Image (cartoon, helix red, strand yellow):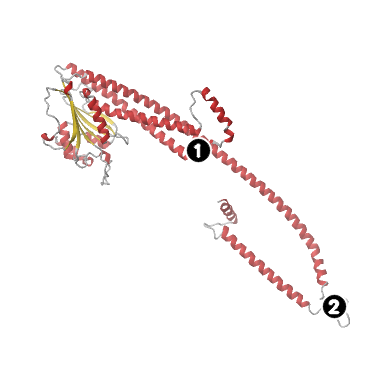
Amino acid sequence: MNRSARHQSNEYKELFGTVEHLRYLEVLNFEDSSKNTFEDGFFDVKEDEAAWPWKKESTDVVKARLRIIFSEAMREPFTRMDNKFSKDRLLRMNQSAFQSIAKEMSLPTSFLRMLRDSSTVFVDVQNTSSTSQDALQTMMLQNSFTTTYRFSVALSYDPIHCLTSALVHGLSTSEISTLTTRMCENMDLIALPTMLFSYLLDSRVITGNLRVEDCHSEIMQIEEQTGLRTVWHPHKNSVKDQDQHKNQDHRPHRYDTLDFDDLTGKLTSISSKLAFCEYTCEVHLPMLDSFDAINKHFVERSLSTSGEKCNLAAAEAQLRTDNSFMRSSLNGTLFRARYLSKRAQAQVQTIYSLIAQKDNALSMRDNASLKAISEDQRRIALAATKDSAAMGVIAAITTVFLPATFTATFFSTTFFNFQPGKGEHIVSGWLWLYFLVTIILSVLIISWWLSISRRKFREIQRTIGTPNGLEGKIETPEELGATFVASKRT
């Protein structure tokens, strides 16, 4: 590795993790296809050439060769809190090990820049689809904007010897096993470098289809709950709809049985997942076109070069067919995601409509309750008016008859004798006793009334408070009355 490459590695030193065993895969194609073989396992990176796990086969007998080193994503917690890179992007190797691998496999060091940028990209470093006649071609592919099946690939290809060398970072153990199995099942296609890229993208295509299918199922469930479902055969559903209309009067309103918080959360999640599926399709479709162009370039170069050992036409045809299928699948997923997005938006409008209906129904119920309260208040007011009128009549009668009654009662007592005998007085000497008892009883009754009134007032203070005793400052009696009403409602 030259000095500029080492300087570039130092610039991205925070991307390197701890040194661990790396997994490798080597696939060999021979002129005699029955001798095709593959080998995978683990090895430690060393600068010694003898330490590399590759077989020492003569290039005269090897038709095509594929060499892959896998670096799994870091799963354990990362203690460097000031690090700005996700731990999933950390390489399971130190800087020295990466430099050794890059030198051995002739990988582009710009792979570190791509890994740090964390973008979903495909980079044809030497622009292999052009008329370049460089002996060694390098490419990079990264899929990182996702929580599953994240990978970053740096690849070099020697078209003369049909040798593909790649470093694949980010796959889990199970994903590596799945990819290894598929590569070994299609050994005849390793002569072209984009085989690895196509198989990596194929997993993203499958995942996108599954996610869109899940979104479709969730939307159908929400449609059943909201009552807005797509009816493709109205005649078949007419009987069912009639039965539902017959029983509609006996069922609660639909908006009373729905959990709007749950539904809006689900619709938001569905919209986010569909937007991600659209992104996945749109970002991967141009990559397939680039793969086909690269394969076509190598086939044309193979046909124009005499003495080429490997026939790439068959492999190119098979990969073109696979890419065409993935392209059609991505287009179908893209259109379906857009359709489901509009369908989800229709459900959002339905939810808003149901919420408005529920608000209107609650307002009508409140208005009816207020009307009933107003009627009760009117009846109470009428009753109070009648009571007031009756009390007025009683007060008037009392006012008229009380003086006469008091006078008659007072003068009918033994304190007065209007026919006094000899030596008797008209007014008794015990008249003072009347006034004494009257004054004492009046004082006792008034004191008892004041005590009872104060006790009742304290109970009212403890119950509803006073302008100075309520929490928060209340300036006016009207505010005290509003607080009393609020406490009664709660």
Give x and y (percent) for residue 474.
Answer: 55, 57
Give x and y (percent) for residue 137.
Answer: 19, 26
Mark 2 highlights which residue?
426
Return the disc, 1 or 2, that comes first in the chain's sequence.
1
Q: 231 or 129, which lies in front?
A: 231
Q: Quadrant of residue 282?
A: top left
Q: 28 or 138, which lies in front?
A: 28
Q: Residue at x 66, y 49 (%)?
A: 377
Q: Which mark is residue 384?
A: none
Classed neighbour count for the residue bearing mark 1: other residues with Cα under 10 Å, few (<14), some (14–19), many (≥20): some
Mark 2 residue type: Ile
SS for tag 2? loop
Using the image, determine if residue 290 lies above or below residue 225.
above
Tell me how far mark 1 sits from mark 2, CA to CA: 93 Å
Q: Residue at x 71, y 73 (%)?
A: 440
Give x and y (percent) for residue 390.
Answer: 75, 56
Q: Residue furthest front?
A: 34
Mark 1 highlights which residue?
258
Q: 377 or 43, which lies in front?
A: 43
- Left or right: residue 213 versus residue 400 is left
Mark 1 residue type: Leu
Classed neighbour count for the residue bearing mark 2: other residues with Cα under 10 Å, few (<14), some (14–19), many (≥20): few
Q: Residue at x 59, y 34 (%)?
A: 249
Is residue 296 visible from the viewing direction of this image? no
SS for tag 1? loop
Using the image, determine if residue 261 lies above or below residue 424.
above
Using the image, determine if residue 468 lies above or below residue 264.
below
Using the image, determine if residue 392 lies above or below residue 300.
below
**Where is the N terminus found, in terms of image quarters?**
top left
Q: Quadrant of residue 131?
A: top left
Is residue 95 visible from the viewing direction of this image? yes
Give x and y (percent) for residue 261.
Answer: 47, 40
